[in-house]
């Protein structure tokens, strides 16, 4: 009798702990973050076209939020202050030019995008984080003076706070009044909107050659300039955390810095990598912020694949996990979904393969508690990426189903092959072409098919103010738009040449940033800031405009590089469209 009772107790205890264990697992699964960035700068994700029309803005927001809900997204990181302007009603900043088309002009009917996005996200059981760029004043080199900004813009009202760097304008992080402006702007949001979090990305000091001589003379007190710059940003992050938590301890404050804090060869605490270092290049001591408890989470942008020669994804992800293993700071990973767009069959990013491998790895590292995908438009415009994001993590925390994803990838490939044979235009007229591209009523561009017959590919009419680029009849999506500098078009180097199926290599050593593209046994390379390119390692070709860094992207003169790779470049001035074939 005693044995039976004892056995009953033991079995009951086992069952009890199994139930507890199951519930615990479910709780952990539900807490895993599956986030997505929605960019508003340059109208990358929202709105697709600048407009004051509240009904259009609402409709686009509804579509994005619904798609995110379908994918099981838990957190949307919505860019509400892309430059020194706002996607919400603000006492400190004018309405954004990327919203209505004119800085300081409000949407119709009293529409407040941030309020609307919050309400819609919460109705779908998603959290919304207000994504802010604290120091960036402009993102367009053509805006050369603060006098071009809205009268209410704090940069125009206080030009002494502004420093120009590589064609753009930034607030000087050393100025106490700038620091207070950033704090006031954040507190305005948390006090007036039901946001779930405040989010900064990787923009702090824009670079090492930032001309802050005046503020250093005034505030530097003889300190090492690099350390002084880091202290300026430290002071802001610490003060922001204190202010936010004093108002509402439930509001999350987090940072998504560039993936590499420091390389071990330069700092014994750093990772075994050879990448651009936020500690030295942007003066952002992100490791310190996490360990000191000044931020609730950190989401390093690890934008390299597993096995990358300079910055291996696994190495840097494990470094962050090890660094924060005893910290209360949560660790999420920023993923480069955008690199999959247009990636050739030889690329590790082809059909989202790199993303799948990264998600699998993340799930095996206990400290990693979720991911943030960059960015919305790239994911929904590539079916295989949409399926990967939908199938992995999030509200249901479902394990990734390779067979389902493979089936979807195959279906996508079959669709693409079918499109290579016949693409239907909007007027339902069949057009024979080798490219997989959707068409609308447009100006025609001639292209040769594989059968050497001349067919017609139609480029959409460009109704925007931006330059559109097509590579082999497929539009290239950028996170940094092409710009005109001294009558030369500069484009993001990696996006263009990966779209062409070229292998792209990047080296950043001892302050020298060098890029190389290899395609069909032809090689070109260049150094940022130098007005030459080297072709096939022997021929030096002069450039009118030097390659340069804009918003962390290497921008290169398109025609010079393309033609030296044996490509054909056509420019349609009327339609502001560039087509590259070859």
Image: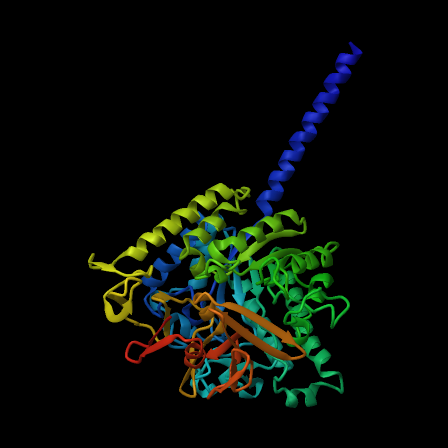
The total number of labels drawn is 0
Quarter holding residue 87: bottom left
Q: Which color scheme did the rendering employ for the protein?
A: rainbow
In front here: 167 or 414? 414
Residue 386 appears left or right of 430: right
- Considering the image in quadrants, where does the C terminus appear? bottom left
Quarter holding residue 142: bottom left
Q: Is residue 316 above or below residue 265?
A: above
Quarter holding residue 234: bottom right
From this viewpoint, is residue 340 visible? yes
Residue 525 appears left or right of 473: right
Horizontal and vertical percent position of residue 308: 61, 62
Tell me the residue at 39%/50% (across/down).
Answer: 412
- Considering the image in quadrants, where does the N terminus appear? top right
From this viewpoint, is residue 551 visible? no
Horizontal and vertical percent position of residue 316: 66, 60
Residue reaching furthest to the top: 1
Q: Is residue 508 above or below residue 145?
A: above
Horizontal and vertical percent position of residue 10: 75, 22
Horizontal and vertical percent position of residue 401: 51, 42
In front here: 264 or 278? 264
């Amino acid at each position: 009798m005693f044995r039976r009772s004892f056995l009953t107790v033991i079995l009951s205890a086992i069952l009890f702990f199994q139930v507890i264990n199951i519930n615990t697992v479910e709780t952990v699964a539900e807490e895993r973050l599956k986030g997505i960035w929605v960019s508003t700068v340059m109208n990358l994700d929202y709105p697709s076209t600048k407009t004051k029309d509240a009904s259009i803005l609402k409709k686009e927001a509804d579509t994005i939020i619904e798609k995110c809900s379908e994918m099981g997204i838990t957190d949307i990181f919505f860019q509400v202050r892309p430059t020194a302007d706002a996607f919400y009603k603000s006492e400190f900043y004018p309405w954004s030019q990327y919203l209505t088309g004119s800085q300081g002009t409000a949407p119709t009917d009293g529409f407040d995008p941030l309020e609307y996005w919050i309400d819609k996200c919460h109705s779908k059981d998603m959290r919304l984080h207000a994504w802010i760029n604290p120091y960036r004043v402009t993102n367009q080199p053509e805006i050369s003076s603060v006098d071009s900004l809205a009268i209410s813009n704090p940069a125009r009202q206080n030009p002494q706070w502004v420093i120009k760097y590589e064609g753009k304008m930034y607030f000087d992080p050393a100025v106490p009044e700038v620091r207070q402006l950033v704090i006031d702007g954040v507190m305005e949001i948390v006090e007036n909107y039901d946001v779930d979090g405040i989010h900064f990305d990787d923009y702090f000091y824009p670079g090492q050659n930032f001309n802050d001589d005046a503020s250093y003379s005034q505030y530097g007190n003889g300190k090492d300039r690099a350390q002084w710059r880091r202290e300026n940003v430290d002071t802001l992050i610490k003060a922001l955390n204190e202010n936010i938590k004093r108002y509402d301890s439930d509001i999350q404050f987090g940072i998504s810095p560039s993936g590499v804090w420091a390389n071990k060869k330069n700092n014994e605490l750093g990772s075994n990598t050879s990448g651009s270092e936020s500690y030295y290049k942007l003066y952002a001591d992100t490791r310190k912020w996490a360990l000191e408890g000044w931020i609730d989470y950190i989401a390093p942008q690890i934008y390299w694949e597993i096995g990358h020669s300079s910055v291996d994804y696994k190495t840097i992800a494990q470094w962050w996990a090890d660094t924060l293993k005893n910290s209360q700071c949560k660790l999420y990973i920023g993923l480069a979904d955008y690199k999959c767009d247009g990636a050739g069959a030889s690329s590790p990013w082809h059909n989202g393969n790199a993303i799948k491998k990264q998600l699998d790895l993340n799930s095996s590292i206990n400290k990693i508690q979720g991911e943030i995908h960059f960015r919305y438009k790239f994911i929904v415009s590539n079916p295989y990426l949409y399926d990967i994001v939908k199938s992995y993590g999030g509200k249901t925390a479902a394990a990734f189903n390779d067979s389902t994803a493979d089936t979807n990838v195959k279906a996508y490939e079959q669709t693409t092959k079918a499109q290579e044979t016949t693409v239907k235009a909007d007027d339902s007229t069949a057009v024979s072409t080798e490219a997989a591209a959707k068409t609308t009523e447009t100006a025609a561009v001639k292209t040769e098919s594989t059968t050497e017959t001349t067919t017609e590919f139609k480029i959409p009419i460009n109704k925007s103010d931006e330059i559109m680029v097509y590579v082999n009849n497929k539009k290239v999506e950028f996170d940094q738009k092409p710009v005109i500098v001294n009558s030369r078009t500069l484009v993001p180097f990696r996006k263009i040449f990966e779209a062409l199926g070229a292998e792209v290599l990047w080296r950043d050593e001892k302050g020298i940033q060098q890029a190389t593209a290899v395609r069909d046994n032809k090689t070109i390379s260049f150094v940022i800031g130098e007005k030459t390119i080297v072709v096939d390692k022997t021929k030096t070709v002069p450039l009118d405009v030097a390659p340069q860094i804009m918003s962390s992207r290497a921008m290169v003169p398109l025609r010079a590089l393309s033609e030296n790779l044996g490509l054909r470049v056509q420019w349609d001035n009327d339609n502001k469209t560039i087509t590259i074939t070859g």
